[in-house]
Amino acid sequence: MSEIEADDMDEIGAVESMDKLNSLRITSLDDDDIHDDEELQDDHDTDDDDDEESNESVVLGFVAKPKNSWSLLPQLFPSKAGGVPAWLDPVNLPSGRSCVCDICGEPLQFLLQIYAPIVEKDSTFHRTLFAFMCPSMTCLLRDQHEQWKRKSDKSSRSVKVFRGQLPRSNPFYSSEPPKHDGSDKACESGGRFDLFFLLSKSSNYFNTLLFFKIALIYNMSSICDVVLVARCNWCGTWKGDKVCGKCRTVRYCSEKHQAIHWRTGHKTDCQRMCVSSQLSSSRLTNSHSETDIEKVSSKHLWPEFEIMHEYESEFDIEISHDNSYANAMVCKDRMDDSMKSLLANFEGDDDRKSWASFQGRLSKAPEQVLRYCRDVGSKPLWPMPSGLPSKEDIPKCSYCSGPMCYEFQILPQLLYYFGVKNDVDSLDWATIVVYTCEASCESSIAYKEEFAWVQLSVPSAVHQ
């Protein structure tokens, strides 16, 4: 095959991948037209009334360990869960109160991100949704009540979702489709991604000098602002706008992360780094400190996975033994036991029947952690009829005042992969449903906050 033909095939593959994401659909068990508010609350149909056409449009998300070390780099526009976010815009990160749980005030933890471009609009050629949450179940219980507040009341949330989008021609990435062979760079001029991530993981004095030297040599003055967005050395997620007062090299997003890092290793590293900065710019010495920092922080993050997607209709037929999910990390018996445990929490025939239908729908592919669709009129798959939002509960877009639409939902199976224990006080939910701006509007804000509706499996937590 000629080089031109190979490039054409790469571009075709990338376009097909975008088309698949663009055509994502999801349907609820109820295929009737949209009901009014009272009917939505009181007459939610939980019968498993799936039709073949709607199943073909539902896309399911599964987690798998990344195949390669570069699979989840930002320039490949990944969908991923756990670890640290691969920010679409690496410079203009969310800041201030957007980064913290409104209930306890602690920095939010990265949950997952979904690459979902809308290629019909130039401004959304690249589009990623990022979900964060507080790992405290106490905060999630409070969040479930706060979400019922009307727009006039300021709600406090522990689950937040951000939408980032870029046109095809942008300062960060090539306009050509990625090759997915490990050779993709973040921009055509080269170097930007490597330098940014070098600084985001360990923004120290010597790395900053190295960056400026390379920038001067290659006349890269236009990207020197990357130095200003080094991330927190503890969580690797949020902007590190606070610096260690002693070594002046390690950065944090909050005083809490600075205090934790100090107690768990930086107190020793800090002294060594101070001595190193005075005596030598040895790369070996710095690399040792950077490794220690990354090792400490990685223990406090949820494990990192790549999110793979398949149409739900592909699971309508009997799954063969050589199917890629036959050897999934969660066996069907284990998943059934988890479902039975959750089912035992529900009281009343309606909730039990609804959960049984929910379980039956999920049993086609029990390892699924996410369901996605952005079709007009699409609806989530609700586990139970109580605690559903009315039309008035879904706010207008905060940026264009336009309507919001359902886009995806996160299932509790994800907690198993994250290693969350099934204890009384452990983090848990029935589903987290995300609504986004129907127009995917533009604004000067790089990351626009969307709306998440939490439905819990604890009967006492359901809104009365």
Image (cartoon, rainbow, N blue to C red):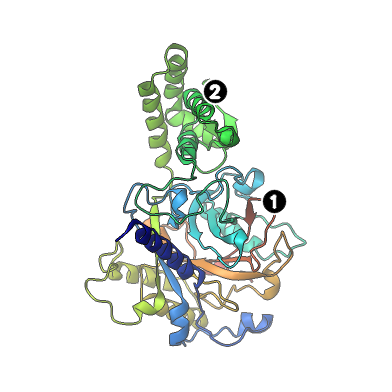
Disc number lying in front (1 or 2): 1
In the drawing, does residue 352 fall left or right of residue 121? left
SS of the residue at dot 1? loop
Residue 181, horizontal then vertical, whole percent: 34, 51
The location of residue 35, given as percent across then percent down, is: 64, 84
Disc 1: CA contacts within 10 A as few (<14), some (14-19) or many (>=20):
few
Q: Residue at x 43, y 31 (%)?
A: 264
Residue highlighted by disc 1: 444
Q: Is 380 situated above or below 436?
A: below
Residue 430 in sight from this viewpoint: no
The circle drawn on residue 248 is 2
Check the image and name the residue furthest to the top.
Answer: 279
Seen at 52% across and 51% down, the residue is: 136
Query: Residue reaching furthest right?
Result: 152
- SS class, disc 2: loop
Name the image quarter holding residue 403: bottom right
**Image quadrant containing the N terminus:** bottom left
Q: Amino acid at mark 2?
A: Arg
State whether residue 150 appears in this view. yes
Task: Say which label, 1 or 2, has the lower sequence index.
Answer: 2
Q: Is residue 449 above or below residue 299?
A: below
Q: CA distance from mark 1 to mark 2?
A: 32 Å
Say which of 88 and 26 sits in front: 88
Classify mark 2: residues with Cα within 10 Å, few (<14), some (14-19) or many (20+).
some
Percent position of residue 447, x then y:
62, 52
- Residue type at mark 1: give it: Ser
Return the x and y of residue 446 as percentages of the image width and height. 63, 50
Q: Quadrant of the C terminus?
A: bottom right
